[in-house]
Image (tube, rainbow, N blue to C red):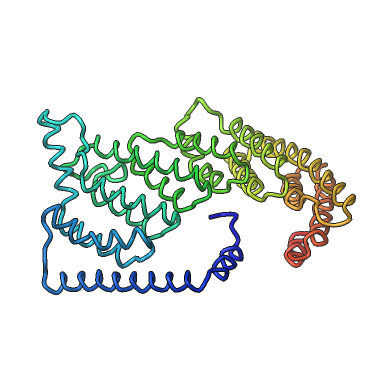
Amino acid sequence: MHGRRKAENQAALLARSEAEKEAARDKVHKYKQLVALALKQRREANDQNLTVTTRKELEEALALSAQLLRVNPDVYTLWNHRKEAIAASQVVRHELEGAYARETGGELENALPPNSFLQTELSMIAECIQKNPKSYGAWHHRRWLLEHAFPCTASSPSCSSATSPSQLVATLDKEVALCAQLLDVDERNFHCWNYRRWVVSQHPGRSATDEFEFSTARIYKNFSNYSAFHHRAAYLSGHLTESGQTLNPKVFLRQELDMVQQAFFTEPDDQTSWWYHQYLISLVLKEGGREGGEEGGKEFVREVLEGEVEIIRGLAEEGEEERGAKGKGGGYRWAVLTLASLLRQLASSQGEEGEEGRGEVLRKESRGLFERLGRMDPDHAKRYENIVVSSF
């Protein structure tokens, strides 16, 4: 989990009594014995070509691995053992297909079979994720399980399957809700964010705008949530496409810049919002180029860059005053770096006759800021020196 130092864990381990250490060693020994037994059972089943066909047989074959994974979800071989058994038995698909047949026959209102093996397995995986929210094996198995259960999803609409679309939607709705709950616990769990994006890609009723709005709520909850900004960037283009004529890209980008300004004025030394700001500027430059180099596109880029320079210059000056008062540290390094980059980009846009002099003034100011960064941030002084040498 974030915010917990390794030294604290190490100190707690060293402070244990000899009796506690002996109990831990005994527990590890027993666990290793059970893992060895589970692997032996898997080898014997493979050697004897034993086939599992019923749910009862499947649960019995996987009982020990489930017990072990609840203790330690990071034994990837055990997850693979479960995949092999589930895929070979076809129990999950048979349950879903049977429920779909009853649903189409009017015998069942709920498309998801109650207490199905799929639901049981998902619950077991959720327990493992709670044990270790960043277990690669648990997250990968959860995705594999749903891909096995529902071969026909939003990403493969042309395939044929005897499962119901309502089964898929109901299951994926629960997955979206689960991700939201887990992100409430750890908002920067990249496993959960990545899994959520995959779920949304399979969900026929989930839009880019839905996820864009989800990121908005997460960002306003914590401006330092880089994962939420990354999620927003992943769905920004889709959100614009879905909005169509109702949302002007230029107006939208200005609104996004206003939002990110709130973030970096709140936490000027946090790099998260500055990275997203850099991404937005790249979109501004791209949007300006859409007009084929015509004056309208150039003017849009110039107006945005000048506006951002004015705002960030004030923040950089505030940081410099704070740095002068303290005598060291401070200075809002990310504000100075962004300002230097913006000035360099703005100088490049001053190509018309009569503007070359202004471009030189902007380049000179930008160079001075990169030189200042070398003094503010000596660990990266060579990087700033290289920028000055290669760009001015």
Quadrant location of residue 350? top right
Q: Quarter-wise, where is residue 37 in the image? A: bottom left
Q: Residue 52, relative to residue 10: is it above or below?
A: above
Question: Residue 376: in sight, yes or no?
Answer: yes
Q: Nearer the viewer, residue 275 or 88?
A: 88
Residue 378 lies, in percent from the top left, at 78, 65
> Is residue 351 at all visible to an observer of this figure?
no
Point 29% across, 36% down: residue:
170
In the depicted view, which residue is nearer to us: 76 or 278?
Answer: 76
Q: Who is closer to the viewer here, 165 or 27?
A: 27
Where is residue 215 shown, x and y percent of the image? 52, 39
Identify the residue at the far top of this view. Answer: 246
Residue 161 placement (x, y as % from top left) = 18, 44
The residue that appears at 18% across and 59% down in the rendered structure is 60
- Image coords of residue 175 (percent x, y): 36, 42
Of residue 226 and residue 48, the one placed in the foreground of this image is 48
Residue 296 located left or right of residue 68: right
Total marks in image? 0
Left or right: 296 with respect to 365?
left
Q: What residue is rendered at 16% in x and 53% in y?
A: 90
Q: Quadrant of the C terminus?
A: bottom right
Write the residue at 42% across / 44% down. 179
